[in-house]
Amino acid sequence: MWQSVIKFVAENYQVISICGAMFAFYKWHISQRQKEVETLQSLIATLRKPEVLRFVRKADYEGRWYDAKFHDSELEEVVDGVLTEYSYLCHLRKTRMISRATFDFFRYDIESILSDPQMIDYLYNLYQYTRKVKTMFPFIHLLEYGFKHGYAKGQIFNDSNAWKNLNFTII
């Protein structure tokens, strides 16, 4: 009996190998989808915190929030945290660690933030400040997404006269 099994395997090893490879690929694909679901759940838990949602809505609907009182305030900490999370999300998408469908869950928030002229002012001031002190701009992936999709014009970030209210003393 074992001889017939050995003979069958020897004669059909290519078919058996192909079936094994297909099964391994299927299991790998399922595990990748599960990882993406876990990543999405983690991102939702982080980016749907009340303070994050309050800030996104503030950027959408409220009046002026970026002024001299902003720096060293609780709001600045929230804004920096929100920008860090969304910049990381843009990095994950850029490096294809998350799918477009997963990224789309957060696209509205990102585009709302980048559509806010005050946010562009803040990003510009922070960008110019980091250049002045020769350090890395912390939200580069978010800014690159903004450039790519027309929310921030790249040339204004290199123009020192773009905003007349740039004040490094308040940063």
Image (tube, helix red, strand yellow):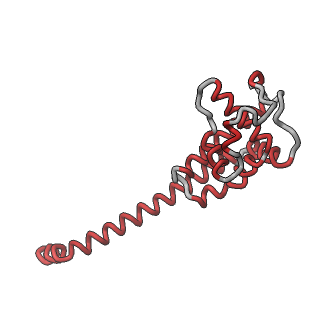
The x, y position of residue 166, in whole percent, is 77, 29
Q: Please tell me which residue is depicted at 77% across the width and 26% down the height of the picture.
A: 167
- Looking at the rendered image, the quarter that the N terminus falls into is bottom left
Q: Nearer the viewer, residue 129 or 53?
A: 129
Q: Quadrant of the C terminus?
A: top right
Most distant residue in the right direction = 63
* Image position of 118 (left or right of 82): right
* Quarter holding residue 74: top right
User: What percent of the width, then of the height, locates residue 132?
Assistant: 65, 25
Q: Of residues 77 and 71, which is closer to you in this image?
A: 71
**Position above or below: 109 against 63:** below
Q: Residue furthest top?
A: 169
Q: Classify residue 82 by image quadrant.
A: top right
Q: In the image, residue 45 lies at what x, y percent?
A: 65, 48
At horizontal 59% and vertical 25% (from top left) the residue drawn is 134
Q: Is residue 8 left or right of residue 114?
A: left
The residue sitting at 68% across, 31% down in the picture is: 128
Q: Is residue 8 above or below residue 137?
A: below
Q: Quadrant of residue 68?
A: top right
> Is 123 above or below relative to 98?
above
Count numbered badges in the picture: 0
The residue drawn where x is 68% and y is 40% is: 83
Q: Is residue 26 left or right of residue 55?
A: left
